[in-house]
């Protein structure tokens, strides 16, 4: 657990943090419904056991101000041995009032450090073609565009393309 100079604490969540995970994940899905492959409806009715399973299936980093979760970023590693050097960045969200403070980069830095410690060499993500701010953030963070998935998401009857972005990370 690290205390940042900006007053927040950024840490990887564990099984005892299911309620904090639930709060920030549902907030993200409510605030940015077109940004995620999942919908609010996919998550809000889940049992506590399912929330725990999803939390533990990923490595989830959350930034807190006091006990209030204000940002989230997850990483899912590949299981196949020939792909175990790769991980996908998921569930990225920063509360609107915290945007522009550098918090997203601080959370990403923690995730990257953890990824390197786990032997990950490449981070991958998908970002909506409609989310220019996110794409710019990822580019500033060293991600490069590697492709496009046409009609990657179907949101309220609208097809949304996604960019695939990749970042090599050093060990």
Image (tube, grey):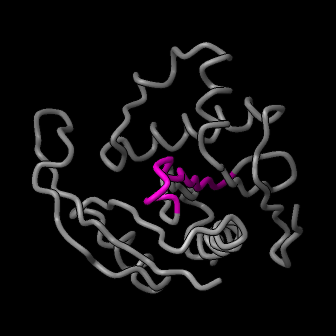
Residue 36 belongs to magenta span: no
Residue 49 in the figure: left or right of residue 156: right
**Where is residue 37, by image quadrant?**
top left
Residue 142 in the figure: left or right of residue 151: right
Q: Position of residue 72 (x, y in %)?
A: 61, 53
Residue 80 belongs to magenta span: yes
Tell me where the magenta segment starts and ends, as one range: 70-84
Q: Residue pushed farthest front? A: 81
Q: Which residue occupies the foreground of this view, 7 or 165?
A: 165
What residue is rendered at 76% in x and 45% in y? 13
What residue is rendered at 39% in x and 69% in y? 134
Q: Position of residue 75 (x, y in %)?
A: 56, 54
Q: Position of residue 61 (x, y in %)?
A: 69, 54
Image quarter hosting the C terminus: bottom right
**Where is residue 58, by image quadrant?**
top right
**In the rendered image, the vertical position of residue 54 relative to residue 68, given as above or below:** above
Q: Which residue occupies the foreground of this view, 168 or 45?
A: 168
What residue is rendered at 33% in x and 71% in y? 165
Count the marks: 0
Q: Which residue occupies the foreground of this view, 164 or 86?
A: 86
Image quarter hosting the N terminus: bottom right
Q: Position of residue 56 (x, y in %)?
A: 67, 36
What residue is rendered at 37% in x and 35% in y? 38
Residue 54 in the figure: left or right of residue 153: right
């Amino acid at each position: 657990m690290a205390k940042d100079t900006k007053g927040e604490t950024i840490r990887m969540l564990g099984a005892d943090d299911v309620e904090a995970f639930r709060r920030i994940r549902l907030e993200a899905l409510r605030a940015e419904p077109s940004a995620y492959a999942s919908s609010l409806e996919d998550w809000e009715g889940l049992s506590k056991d399912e929330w725990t399973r999803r939390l533990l299936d990923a490595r989830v980093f959350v930034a807190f101000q006091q006990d209030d979760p204000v940002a989230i970023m997850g990483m899912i590693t590949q299981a196949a041995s020939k792909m175990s050097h790769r991980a996908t960045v998921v569930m990225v969200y920063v509360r609107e009032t915290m945007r522009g403070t550098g918090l997203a980069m601080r959370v990403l830095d923690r995730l990257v450090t953890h990824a390197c410690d786990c032997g990950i060499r490449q981070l991958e993500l998908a970002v909506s073609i409609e989310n220019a701010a996110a794409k710019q953030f990822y580019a500033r963070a060293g991600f490069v565009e590697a492709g496009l998935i046409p009609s990657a998401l179907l949101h309220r009857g609208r097809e949304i393309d996604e960019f695939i972005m990749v970042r090599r990370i050093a060990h």
